[in-house]
């Protein structure tokens, strides 16, 4: 290994470590704000409307579809470095999100449990959307961001989260992808097209050779 390559890898490693420290510091700050506000789960009843049930289901589908699309693009491109960066982004996003959920223990608006803050759906979708844009070009991430925004709105509308839950989740996911993902020289064009019907929602992957 040449000195230039070794220096590059060391600098790249230092940058990622610095980014991880930054996310941890932000997490500590969030905990210091919200932990005093956390309360034990309350017994209450909430019955969602049919519209809320439908929106909830669509957000569950999108929360799987966007990361799956990001993975599909990476594998089609045989972008193994991108696969590692995506895995690191996913791991940090999941770790920070779950850690905060169990530390803060905020009640959901529907009182189903005390893991409302932050929104896992928002963190996952915005992490995947930012990964797609950062790695393969921002114009391909526009539909993914539109669906991520819909997901954030849907989680609030469906009474699964407060607005600050989805805002924090989006920030965690986007920040993780921005820190750990680097641009990739495209060989092919990739397009994400929203697909929404009365009973379902998702994305269609378009790929040109």
Image (cartoon, rainbow, N blue to C red):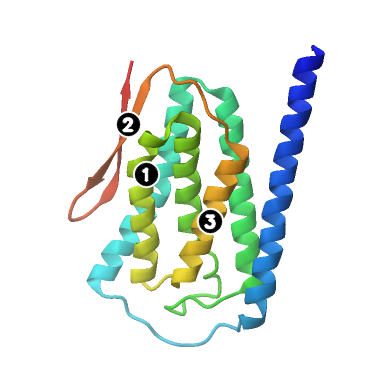
Callout in the foreground (2, 3): 3
Q: Closer to the N terminus: mark 2 or mark 3?
A: 3
> In the rendered image, which residue does mark 2 sit on?
191
Q: Quadrant of the C terminus?
A: top left
Crowd band around label 2 with a 10 angstrom C-alpha radius: few (<14), some (14–19), many (20+): some
Q: Is residue 198 above or below residue 39?
A: above
Q: x, y percentage for residue 144?
A: 37, 44
Total labels: the figure holds 3
The CA span between labels 1 and 3 is 15 Å
Crowd band around label 3 with a 10 angstrom C-alpha radius: few (<14), some (14–19), many (20+): some
Residue in the image at 32% along x and 31% along y: 191
Label 1 secondary element:
helix
Q: Is residue 83 above or below residue 196?
A: above
> In the rendered image, which residue does mark 1 sit on?
144
Which of the labelled discs sits on residue 171, or is there none? 3
Q: x, y percentage for residue 156?
A: 38, 69
Residue in the image at 56% along x and 36% along y: 86
Label 3 secondary element:
helix
Which of the labelled discs sits on residue 42, or is there none? none
Q: Residue furthest bottom?
A: 43
Q: Closer to the N terminus: mark 1 or mark 3?
A: 1
Q: Residue furthest left?
A: 198
């Amino acid at each position: 290994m040449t000195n230039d390559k070794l220096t590059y890898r060391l600098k790249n490693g230092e940058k990622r470590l610095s980014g991880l420290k930054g996310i941890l510091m932000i997490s500590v700050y969030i905990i210091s704000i919200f932990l005093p506000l956390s309360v034990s789960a309350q017994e209450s009843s909430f019955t969602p409307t049919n519209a809320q049930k439908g929106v909830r289901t669509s957000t569950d589908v999108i929360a799987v579809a966007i990361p799956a699309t990001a993975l599909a693009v990476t594998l089609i491109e045989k972008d193994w470095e991108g696969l590692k960066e995506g895995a690191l982004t996913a791991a940090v996003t999941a770790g920070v999100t779950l850690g905060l959920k169990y530390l803060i223990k905020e009640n959901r608006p529907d009182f189903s449990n005390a893991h409302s803050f932050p929104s896992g759906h928002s963190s996952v979708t915005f992490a995947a959307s930012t990964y797609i844009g950062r790695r393969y070009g921002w114009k391909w991430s526009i539909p993914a961001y539109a669906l991520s925004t819909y997901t954030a709105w849907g989680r609030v509308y469906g009474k699964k989260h407060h607005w600050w839950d989805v805002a924090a989740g989006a920030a965690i996911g986007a920040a993780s992808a921005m820190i750990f993902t680097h641009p990739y020289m495209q060989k092919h064009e990739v397009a994400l097209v929203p697909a929404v019907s009365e009973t379902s929602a998702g994305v269609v992957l378009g790929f040109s050779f």
